[in-house]
Image: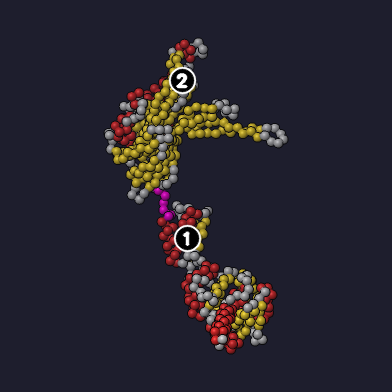
Amino acid sequence: MKIKVSGSKAVIGFIIFALFLSFSLNVEGQSPVSSQKITLDIKGMDIVDVLKILSQRTGMNIVASRNVTGRVTIFLKDVDVWDSFEIILLSNDLAYEVKGDIVSVMTGREYETIYGERFKDKKELSIIQLNYAKAVEIAKALNQVKTAVGRVVVDEGSNTLILMDTHDRLMQMEEMARVMDASTVTKVFALDYAKSDKLNAKIQDMVTKGVGSVRFDERTNKVVVTDLPEKVIEIEKVINAFDEKTRQVSIDAKIVQVELEDKFKSGIDWKAVFRRLTVEQTLTAGLTTGGKLTISTVFGDPNKTLDSVIDVLKETGKTDIISSPKVTAIDGEEAKILVGTKEAYITATTTTPATGAVTTAESVNFVDVGVQLYVTPTINKEGFVTMKIRPVVSSVSSRIETTASPDGVPIIKTSEAETSVVVKDGVTIVMGGLMEDKKVKSVNKFPILGDIPILGFPFRKTSEEVKKTELVIFLTPTVISGDLPGAIGSSEEDLIYTRYYDTIREKILDTAMRYYQQGYVSGEVAILFSIARNGSLRGEPKLLNEARPELADLAVRSLKASAPFPPLPKGLRGDVENFRITISYE
């Protein structure tokens, strides 16, 4: 019996504890309805009618005591139902009690009579109108510090926070909201060099969450920053760091072709060449067609370096400067140099409609053939330039005849390499090893007799031979500011070049007219030639088109007879300038 009585007491005690725990959990702060949003726009309505509306729209079972009176003015949008209920009661000094699915609403005095303590001692209400910060973002921070019975309600329309919590914690949350709602400043930054849309991504993460903002206008290239004063100062430093003047590199290139003699068919011995120069470093890179690309950096004046190397190269074969391009590249961006031609071929597209005639559309396509040089310079603070170099040498190896392209689609043979080299500003890079086999067709004939159709065949001989050539590329990078007079590509230098060209052109044409005899054969001869600083011819002139041998000889003799020319003007910075002239004989 004692055992049974003891057991009964234990069971009864457990039931009482469970009921007390259940009652404690439902007295306050627990929502008896599922989570849902509600919008209220009420002004001066009786609170009993407001509770009735909540009951009808949400399914809450609400019982209000006879002493519950007052009027409600509230404007809430998309707020949790239970949060709205608590806000309405606390703003009218009312209390509530939850038992199962029933919510009893009473006055604060009635609650104190029943439970012996004031209802508002546990939870107080505070409404904060924010001036600068966004309520949604501030609420995220306050939700981290509220107590278990606390609530943070956001009204985005009015940018207002409604806080409910214990007295001490509510004071802390109010202070946090006040600090975070500090006054902001707005500053407009006009960018000179950086692009606003690209800079926007870099500073977007720096703004104060919920307070700051970044906007950019692509048309005016301006950035508008709104944030706390100290944060705007930090962002300004970052903007100034990125909005620096873009540095540029002037690349002076010389492309030299060496027609190798028989004993140098395997290529130029670059070790022997560089032993005669002041070489800082020598690198090699593999070519896609086999062999190696040799790259060296050479100290000294670029023009003297060019002269020294050409003097050595002449010992290996006939040497010609085929091009002297000059380009300016922006720091970190690729520049392209093409010395060659664009081979054309035709493609056809046939359309067969369900009804009607078949149509064929032809289009002309082009492919670059010759020497292509891709250079990407990167400048560091110490004046060194990292040159990413990719030379490509291509030629037409054969053609495939098609219906659309009777002349054939060109099959391109390509040899290329890619490497990077770091050089000091003004140091010359020498690249060799780009070898190519060229088919040269020559015609030997007796004058006049060899030109007779059919009958002149015994008096002329056509031969074809393969000549091995090697290309040597000189690159001299020079860091420039971009606003210096006479910079590469500037209108001033172009004007000086044009005036000088007109002077030498008139002199050459006058000489050609004196050499030409009336009734002689007609035609055109295009010649590429180089003039040194002192006005003398540099190297042998090069024919750029197929012309009658007698006309080509006459044009070259006229050019040589016109030399020396006036010295190069001071506005032309190079010690050697290349010119092209076409002499027409009629």
Whether residue 246 is in magenta: the answer is: yes
Residue 31 seen in the current view: yes
Q: Nearer the viewer, residue 199 or 352?
A: 352
Q: Is residue 201 above or below residue 548?
A: below
Q: Residue at x 60, y 81 (%)?
A: 97
SS label for mark 2: loop
Question: Identity of the amino acid at label 2?
Answer: Arg
Name which quarter of the figure residue 19 lies in.
bottom right
State the predominant SS element of the stretch in magenta. Answer: loop
Q: Residue at x 48, y 53 (%)?
A: 198
Q: Nearer the viewer, residue 366 or 580?
A: 366
**Residue annotated with mark 2:** 548
Q: Position of residue 117 (x, y in %)?
A: 55, 86
Residue 46 seen in the current view: no
First of labels 1, 2 by sequence position:
1
Q: Residue at x 31, y 27 (%)?
A: 315
**Residue annotated with mark 1:** 205
Q: Position of residue 473 (x, y in %)?
A: 38, 35
Label 1, residues with CA under 10 Å away: few <14, some 14-19, many ≥20: few
Name the front one of labels 1 and 2.
Answer: 1
Q: Position of residue 443 (x, y in %)?
A: 44, 18
Q: Which residues are magenta?
A: 242-247
Quarter of the image with the N terminus in it: bottom right
Whether residue 432 is in magenta: the answer is: no
Q: Residue at x 44, y 41 (%)?
A: 335
Q: Position of residue 442 (x, y in %)?
A: 43, 19
Question: Identity of the amino acid at label 1?
Answer: Asp
